[in-house]
């Protein structure tokens, strides 16, 4: 097992952008409040087909990654919308979404129950991105190696999948209470979505 102080694997279409190594396939450790915790499963590798998954919307209707075939998809995984950093992360992507066209989809996925997610979205006016729950089957968390062992939460992370279904960007935030690199994720999203046109 490894404890990484930084984990960001970025593969962009431009050769001018340096890529960081991917740690996919290794057992991953992160921290919660400075205490090491293990993630179950393995994070998928960059430049491989993104694992398909099914989560649910606010009405418990199944939503699958395949529903967004042909679009660039940004996935923002958060532990719980009931915490400050997760709320800010979700609101930030909701705000940024307006600069992208209909060929881009932004998803926030957490283990929160759909009822709680609906209440959060109504209270915080989150109405542009899709907020989805992995609480029913934990399919996303298992396939993306993000389930925090013995906590029932997702690790904070960002994934970007191109229209061909290839995973092009990933960031795993190694301390749960910290923010992801929004600027890097949004720059990658712009580049990946522009290259797809």
Image (cartoon, rainbow, N blue to C red):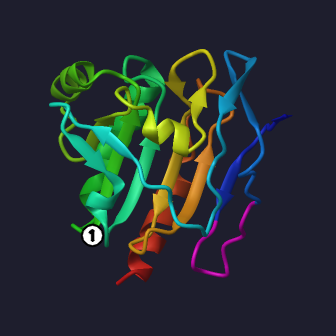
Task: Confirm whether residue 157 shows in the render.
Answer: no
* Quarter assignment of residue 170: bottom right
Residue at 71% over, 67% down: 19
State yes or no: residue 197 in magenta. no
Q: From the viewer's side, name the closer residue of 192 and 39.
A: 39
Identified at 30% across, 37% down, the residue is 132
The magenta span reads 11-20
Magenta stretch: residue 18 in it? yes
Residue 8: x %, y % from top left: 68, 51
> Where residue 110 appears, x then y in whole percent?
40, 31
Q: Is residue 86 above or below residue 25?
A: above
Q: Residues within 10 Å of mark 1 (few under 14, many from 20)?
A: some
Query: Residue 48 falls in which quadrant of the image?
Result: bottom right
Front one among 18 and 156: 156
At numbered mark 1, what does the secondary structure look like: helix, strand or loop? loop
- Residue 3 against residue 50 in the figure, above or below: above
**Residue nearest the viewer, comparing 140 with 79:** 140
Asked which quadrant contains residue 189, the reply is bottom left
Residue located 66% across and 82% down the image: 15
In the shown orientation, is residue 137 left or right of residue 63? right
Q: Can residue 165 be seen in this view?
A: yes
Residue most extreme to the front: 137
In x, y percent, where is residue 98? 24, 56
Q: In which quarter of the image is the N terminus?
A: top right
Image coords of residue 169 (percent x, y): 57, 60
Residue 15 as seen in the image, left or right of residue 152:
right
Taken as a whole, is the magenta stretch helix, strand or loop?
loop
Q: With respect to residue 132, does 16 lie above or below?
A: below
Q: Name the residue under label 1.
A: 103
Q: Which residue is drawn at 60% across and 80% down?
A: 14
Report the quarter where the C terminus lies. Answer: bottom left
């Amino acid at each position: 097992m490894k404890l990484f102080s930084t984990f960001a694997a970025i593969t962009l279409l431009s050769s001018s952008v340096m890529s960081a190594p991917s740690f996919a396939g290794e057992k991953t450790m992160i921290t919660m409040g400075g205490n090491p915790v293990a993630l179950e499963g393995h994070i998928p590798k960059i430049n491989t087909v993104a694992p398909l998954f099914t989560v649910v919307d606010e009405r418990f209707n199944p939503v699958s990654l395949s529903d967004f075939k042909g679009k660039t998809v940004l996935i923002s995984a958060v532990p719980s919308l009931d915490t400050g950093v997760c709320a800010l992360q979700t609101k930030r992507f909701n705000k940024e979404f307006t600069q992208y066209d209909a060929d881009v989809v932004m998803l926030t996925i957490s283990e929160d129950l759909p009822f709680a997610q609906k209440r959060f979205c109504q209270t915080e006016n989150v109405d542009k991105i899709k907020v989805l729950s992995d609480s029913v089957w934990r399919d996303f968390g298992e396939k993306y190696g993000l389930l925090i062992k013995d906590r029932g939460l997702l690790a904070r992370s960002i994934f970007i999948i191109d229209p061909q279904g290839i995973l092009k960007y990933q960031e795993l935030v190694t301390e749960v209470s910290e923010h992801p690199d929004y600027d890097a994720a949004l720059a990658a999203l712009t580049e990946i979505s522009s290259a797809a046109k």
